Amino acid sequence: MLQKLRDKTTGWIATLILGLLIIPFAFVGVNEYMTGGAANDVATVEAPPHWWKSAPSWWPVSMLWERREITLDEFRAEFEQVRAQERQAQGEDFDPREFESMENKLRVLQQLIDREVLALASAQAGIVIGNDAVARAIATEPAFQVEGQFNLERYQLLLSQQNPPLTPQAFEERQRERLGMLVIPQAIGESDFITDKEMERLLRLLGETRDVTIAMVAPPAADAAEVTDAEIKQWYDSHGSDFRQAESVTLEYVEINGAALPAAAPADEATLRKRYEDEKARFVDPEQRLAAHILITVPADADEATVKAAERKAASLAEQARGGADFAALAKAHSEDPGSKDAGGELPWVARDGSMVKPFEDAMFSMQAGEISAPVRTDYGFHVLQLRQIKAGQGRSFEEVRDELAREQAASDGERAYNELAGRVVNEVLKNPTSLTAAAEATGLAVQRVGPVARNAPVGIVAHPSVQRAAFSEALVQDGTVSDPIELAPNHSVLIRVAEHQPERAQPLEQVRDAVIAAIRADRQDKAAQAAADALLARLAKGEKLQEIASAENLQAGQLPGLQRGMQVPTQEANAAIFAAQRPADGKPSTGKVALGNGAWAVFSVDKVNEADLSAIPAEQRAMLRQQVAQMDGASATQAYIDAMRKQYKVKVMEDRL
């Protein structure tokens, strides 16, 4: 038997088949090796290579496609940024639980995907952003300016405060990519326009007002008629989605909170002095230098002649400065650095910390005070430096920083105690991954319980987004194992286990019978109100006036002369319905009905349409409106471009990882 198998698997045909099978497995193996088998992306965007835009997507040609990934960390950072913006915009009305909806997550993810699509499209279009454009964008950014001028010290400070901190070089590359992404959308947006005829029609529509009469429909009496079992059954069967019980979990959890641990004993003098000696370098202010410079820029794609000409100009300026010419005047007249030119080329105090590009920094820290440098080449061009002052580094004594060291040591001891406790809990859980009891007993912590908690109404610790994601994850629900520590805040985490799980399910009719009856009666009342509104409309169609009907029937009514489009009068929906109604014709008003919410209805009649007086619209207002319309049309055209590019690319979204 084995010999027959061997005979059948030899020869060139078998070798070819095995070779074809090995290729995909080889790539899978490489991918597993490089990523460790742990996928961390929530979306991918793949584009055909720029040199073969019509390349098919089938294997193995798809391996040539350019690929961009959106990682879970990138998504979470963007989601938190959007959360902060929404919280600031909505204030007390912000609902964190509603914000955590899958709809919001997908909305944010789609924005990230659009960015990657634009980045790929720009790269494939061969768009290159030069150093000058990057420098101008940074220099004109208001966040980096002080009193209207670019401030290098503020620039460096803001970059250092990012999480994680950014070097100027890394930030410049980000700006380069961002500017590259904006080239095509800006060109599309700026190419849009609106004709005079379109503008006139829009102004007439926006300036139009309507004289309206509106009457509230008398609310029907509370429905007290019998609701039969057949009606209840029919409503329940046809509105099943309204009577479902949300998925819920009951959790057991152990909370590890560093703030609840006993305070560590104050560090002794010897410990603090050792810490001071070990970290003495950070208590020494580094040497700083104050310089001015003149920049002669060189484009990234400059030819050799252009480079030589720039170098000769820089050398000439250096000679003039050495010969006694005023350096500040030379900088104002010749420097091409927009951030320092007007200040005579002066820069803020700089330490040797990588905040300046290396050739510039090396030259500055090799000079003596008052010295003028030879031309220094960087990616921006040629610099002529004048070193003005040197500020030697100064250190702080142990006595000056003792209190700071004591606070840091206390925080360090507290964090160490927290980590040790968390480590002991995790070690105990590893011995029995399906229970928290042994871990709690071994560490003196309590096993707490919460639930059942519905997915759409989280409470307690389940309201924390990370806990909610874990609690309803397939792994914890199916396996019943204890989670990894979930961080709630620094030095504060929980380990959870799903003790009970109830999937989303239909609620039995017996359980929701009263809610079904209430829904049927509310529907009856709404239909009765609509019927009353229809009866009023029928009378209006026969020629009666709405104001006369309202007086005769004791209905609440009123007139709205000169009602403007878009006003929330009486409601936004009612205003939209009024302006959607036909114009009055042959002296007869145009009528309609509209729901006002909570079962209330109103009937309206449009008695007259007042045309806009275009001559009364100032030229400035017209120009502003034209610009706004062009911007909106440009934004729509840009989105259409992104949508078209997405159809050419392969976009994959992993919703289960959000």
Image: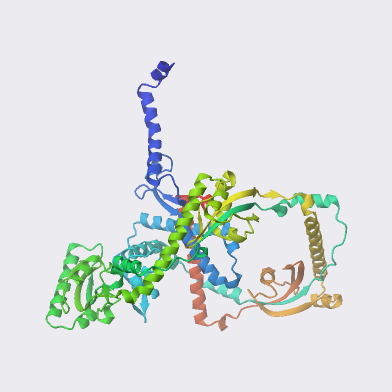
Residue at screen point 70% across, 75% down: 570
Question: Does residue 61 appear in the picture of this structure?
Answer: yes
Going by the image, does 310 lie left or right of 590?
Answer: left
Residue at screen point 50% across, 77% down: 624
Residue 653 image point, x, y percent = 50, 51
Going by the image, does 570 lie left or right of 618?
Answer: right
* Total marks in image: 0
Is 262 in front, or is 376? 262
Q: Is residue 634 placed above or below 506 in the rendered structure?
A: below
Determine which quarter of the picture holds residue 612. Answer: bottom right
Quadrant in which the N terminus appears: top left
Determine which quarter of the picture holds residue 409. Answer: bottom left
Residue at screen point 52% across, 75% down: 625
Residue 386 image point, x, y percent = 19, 77
Residue 607 image point, x, y percent = 73, 76
Residue at screen point 13% across, 83% down: 324
Determine which quarter of the picture holds residue 182. Answer: bottom left
Q: How is the image coloured?
A: rainbow
Question: Does residue 201 appear in the picture of this structure?
Answer: no
Is 307 in front, or is 294? 294
Is 591 in front, or is 306? 306
Going by the image, does 602 lie left or right of 120?
Answer: right
Residue 111 image point, x, y percent = 49, 59
Q: Is residue 159 placed above or below 145 in the rendered structure?
A: above
The single residue placed furthest to the left in the displayed view is 323
Going by the image, does 508 lie left or right of 611?
Answer: right
